[in-house]
Structures are given as structure tokens and as C-alpha cells.
Amino acid sequence: MTNSPFSKVKGVISAKLKDFTSSLNLDYTLDDIESTIELSKKFGDLSSNLLMKISKSHSISMDSLMESIKPYLSNLDYFEDAKVENGFINFYLDKGAFSKLVLELVHLEGEDFMGSDEGKGIKVIVESPSVNPVHPWHVGQVRSALLGDTISNIMESCGYEVEREDYIDDLGLQSAEALWGLINKEKLNIELNPEEKYDHYIGKIYVAANSYMQSNNIEEEIKELSKAMEIDGTYESNLLHDSVSSYIAAEYETAFKLNIYHDDLIWESDIVRNNLLEKAMDLLLKRGIVEKSTDKKYEGCIVINYSKIENLPPEIKGLKEQFKVLIRSNGTPDYLAKDIAFHLWKFGIINGVFKFSKFMDKQPNGKPLYTTSINGEDKPFGNAKITINTIDSRQSYEQSLVKLSIELVGGEKLAEGFNHLAYGMVNLEGQKLAGRKGTWLGYTADDLINEAYTRALSLIGSRFNLTDSEKDFVARNISVSAIRYEFLKMSNEKELIFSWENALNFEGNSGPYCEYTRARAVHILENYNGKLDVKKADFSKLSTDYEFEIIKLLSISQEILERASRELKPNLIVEYLSKLSTLFSKFYEACPVIKVDDQDLKYARLLLVSAFEKVSSKAMKILGINPIDRM
């Protein structure tokens, strides 16, 4: 992967500034200097605050620095001028030379221009959304699924080897309650349609069973059912497996509509069946990370004793309680114990645990979906250097304990690869969603998709001249772009108050707006209907701000992508795509392309349109949005 144009011109500046700092006998590395350079917000095209840093750190007068740097600000490739203004070194690009550099590179690399080799040779496991298999996704859980999928796309675009993983919590209390309801449907007094999509069907049973429990004492029945679920070959375990399998198949009907795919499903029951938990606890006991408690309150429990651990993370250090129970005195594990065991497998600390078979031969993306199973085969899953878990911010304490366990077993360097992608909860305006109470009814992911499709179909029917089949195709893709864009445009740690009005806004800062803007570019290129030739273009004629602002933004696409990867921030890609689309709309209105008389300018503008189309297409694909050529 070629270095980005922005990186190249930063390198030109950095080399000169390195010579300058060396002349002052100051020990600044190229990385130190590059960190001071960014796109200028006011003066010039790029600026550096290096002089201010030197003046402050080394007590050298600004006047002296301004005078001594002058010889180093001339004869800079790709720049026509450089000045010191208000303490900043401002660099003015040669528009023709820089436009040629950017547009020729996009023409050569295509969509790969917005790509990176930063993660080459490094394996990442992204776990999401790991929804309990007892009710359909509601709009809150859509956020987890979309974050995980988009982070996977971002990491892959940066060269990482990505394993997309979905954890199936089939042995939890919620699964037991849903299974009890399935067995005792006649007691629930609800109308059920066996032909209904299965995740909705089992969801109604789960809500009714939970409601039944409020006025009927069935705790012992649930406990006995939970035990029977974990024994291979029982009626209960077989029924559970069939129910969860049907749930997963229904779940993926929804996931595929949102362009979400996975590589493997890890079932909690297979963690138990393959003794991963026991292996993990044995390892933690041998390392002295956990202990069998002799404290009266926790006698017989296997616990983490915080008082015996140095350098506790802030989330744990200030707690009054000094113990965290992993295995209760009756032998039942806390959820955290299983999660720690699971991550010891993810990082390759414990190997050879799971066998895999195909759950689906072929997903819509052309790849199979594998699942842990009894009679499977070995697959190269697990053994990652980086793990990313999309889990809501309420689980930060538990996630910090998983990271602490990884550090205590594998060392600080290995633990650095553990990432909790925390996200704020998604709630409806005026109420909160809750699985047990069934407040998701009417607000499921399927409802969202159907409503978005209906609105999109109505919108395009009144605005675009398309056949019925074309309208259906565009509406399905536009509805997904509207949903994904809306859920991803906000920084993940913030709470998202969901409203239909915002999610289905087809104007301005939205997925459909970006789709429409790109389709305009495609239309221009189709009207030209010729081969683009960089030799025919005179890039020096791209002199307007409309043109050059797009070119500068195109030049930093790789930097935006890499930053989104490092910071785990999909919203950075959304913001970039939004700004790029807005700039192109302004260019479209102000600068004719096909009808311009100057042929050299025409070819240069065509290459600019083509570059915008390629980079915006790549940004959309990273966000899981299918670019539409005609609207």
C-alpha cells in the first residue's frame, strides 16, 4: 500500500524541520515533528506549531526562531510557499502539483487508495453482538451489532486478519426461563403463531414466562431445568439446542438485511462441554490469581482477592469489597468466570478446545458460518493478538476484570490487546427498552428495517423515475444506509435516544444523502462514457476552492481510516463521508464537467469526479452501506 499523499507532503515538511531542529542541537525525531503538522483550519493548507513548542520547552525567543527557520522554508516539493504567521508555520500547497499527486494515485489504486497495511500479519477477534437467544434484536442491540460489524470492516481495511465472532449464551437464566415457557406454553395464556419468525415467537414466550414467574413460584423448576439443560442427551438439552438453532437462523435473517456477517458462533454450552472453564480455573489457581476463599462470607467460593494483587486498574482499586466471586460454593460459575475462560482461549493461552462444523454453507457475502459442535473439525479460530468486545458501558467493571486476568496470566503486553468497545445504551424517547418486560415489542430490528423500507419506497416513488424492480432495489439499500449511518454517526460512548424521525431522515447528514451525492458522480462518468487518461489532464487548472478542498480531503482518507482503527471510532468514517459528500455537492453546483469547453480542465475534473466516486464508495462499504449507482 502506497503512503498517502498527505503522508508524503508531511514527510517533505518533516525532513526540512528536522534539519532545522538539528541546527539548533535539539533532539527531535521525525515522529515528534510530524505530530505537530496537521491540515490548517485558517491559514495555509498545512500548519505546524513546532516553533511554539520549541520556544516553550527550551526558552528560546520566538523572534529568534522565526529568523533562523527562514532558510528551511524554501524549495519544498509540492509547496509554493511557507510562512510563519502568529507563531505557526503555515505551508501553502502548489495546487497543480498536489492535485496531480492525489488524483493520479487514486486513479492507479482505485478504492484501495482508502486502505492501509498498518495491521498486516496481526489477527483480531471482534465479538458482537452476543445477544441472549430469547428475543429478537431490539433497536438497542442493533447498535452493538453495527459497531462490531463496522469495526471489523475498518480493521480489515487496515490489513488486519479479522475473525468476526458471535457468542451464544445458551445456558443462562434467560435461556432457562424461555425453555420453561416453551415446555409449558399452555400455562402462559398467550396466542402464538408457529409460523412466525422464530426469534419473535420465542421472544413472546420468554416475556410471558417471565410475567408468569412474578405471580407463581417456579424457581425450583427453573433450577432443575437449568441442570438438565447442561446434560448431553436429555430431552431438555436437545429441545434447547433445537430452539437456539432456530433462533440463530432467524437472527441471521435480520443480520443479513443489515449487511452483517460472522465467521463463527461460540456456544456457551460448548465451553462447558469441553471443560474450558475448568482448564481456565486450574490455570488461574496454579498462578495464584484466584484462590479458594477461607473468608467466612465467601467460604468455599473461588474468588479473586484484590488485596493480593498489585497495580489494580482504577475501576477496581477504589472498591470497598476486596473479593470477586468467580465460582460459587455450590460449584456454579459466575458469568465473569466463563468470560475469562473464553478470553484465555481467544488469546491462545488455552488451545485445542473447540471443534467446528458449518452452521450455514454460504452467507450472502459468499462465506460459510461455522459453529462450535461435538462432531466438528479443527479450524484456525482463536489465537488472536487483539480482541474487541462491543458491550454496553454498564459492563465496564466486568470487562476490566477480564483484562486484569489476561494481564496476570499472559503479561501486560498481551493484555494491551484487550479492548472493550463500550457504547451508550439506546433507548426510545420517553421509555427504556427491557428484554424481560417486552418493551421491545414493536421496536425490533425487523420493525425498523420494514419501516425504513416503506418510507424509502414512498420517497423514491415521488422523486425518481425508476421501474418497480429498480424502486424495490433502491429502497432496500437506501433503508439500510439510513439505519447504519444514523446508528454509527454518533460517538459510541454516548447514549443514543432513538427516534424514527432521526433514523429515517433522508435529507442532509444521512446515508441516503451520501448515496445520492455519489450517484451524481456516477451519472457524470456515465455521460462521459470514455476512458479516463491522466496524460490529457492539466491539473494546474483545478484552481477553485470547490475543487481543492475535495482534493485535500481525499488526501487524508488513509489517515482517517487508521485513526478510526486505532481509536475504535466508526463515527470518524461517517464524519469523513459526510464532509466529502457535502464538498462534492458544492463542486457539482459550481463547476461544470462534461460541458466545460477547456478539454484539459474537463479531463482533470473527470479524474476528480472519479476519485470522489472511488473514495466515497470505499467509505460506504466500510460502513456496511452498498453504493447505489442509479437513484
Image (cartoon, grey):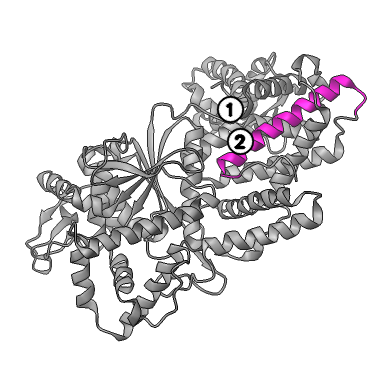
Front residue of this view, candidates 277 and 605: 277
In x, y percent, where is residue 123?
A: 37, 33
In x, y percent, where is residue 254?
A: 50, 55
Residue at 66% across / 37% down in the picture?
616
Residue at 55% across / 27% down in the picture?
34
Q: Residues within 10 Å of mark 2 (few under 14, many from 20)?
A: many
In x, y percent, where is residue 446?
A: 54, 61
What amino acid type is highlighted by mark number 2? Lys
Q: Which residue is outermost to the bottom?
A: 215
Front residue of this view, candidates 341 and 526: 526
Front residue of this view, candidates 396 and 489: 489
Work out whether residue 571 can be spotted: yes
Real-space Cα separation, disc 2 to disc 1, in angstroms: 8 Å
Q: Residues within 10 Å of mark 1 (few under 14, many from 20)?
A: some
In the image, residue 454 sits, relative to residue 56, either above or below, namely below
Position of 598 with respect to 433 (left or right) is right
What amino acid type is highlighted by mark number 1? Asp
Label 1 sits on residue: 112
Magenta range is 596-625
Which element type, helix, strand or loop, lies under badge 1? helix
Residue at 64% across / 59% down in the picture?
452
Whether residue 53 is in magenta: the answer is no
Position of 564 with respect to 454 (left or right) is left
Front residue of this view, candidates 496 and 231: 231
Label 2 sits on residue: 618
Q: Which residue is outermost to the front?
A: 195
Q: Which residue is outermost to the right?
A: 597
In x, y percent, where is residue 338?
A: 24, 53
Q: Which residue is outermost to the left?
A: 294
The chief SS type of the magenta part is helix
Numbered label attached to residue 594? none
Work out whether residue 503 can be spotted: no
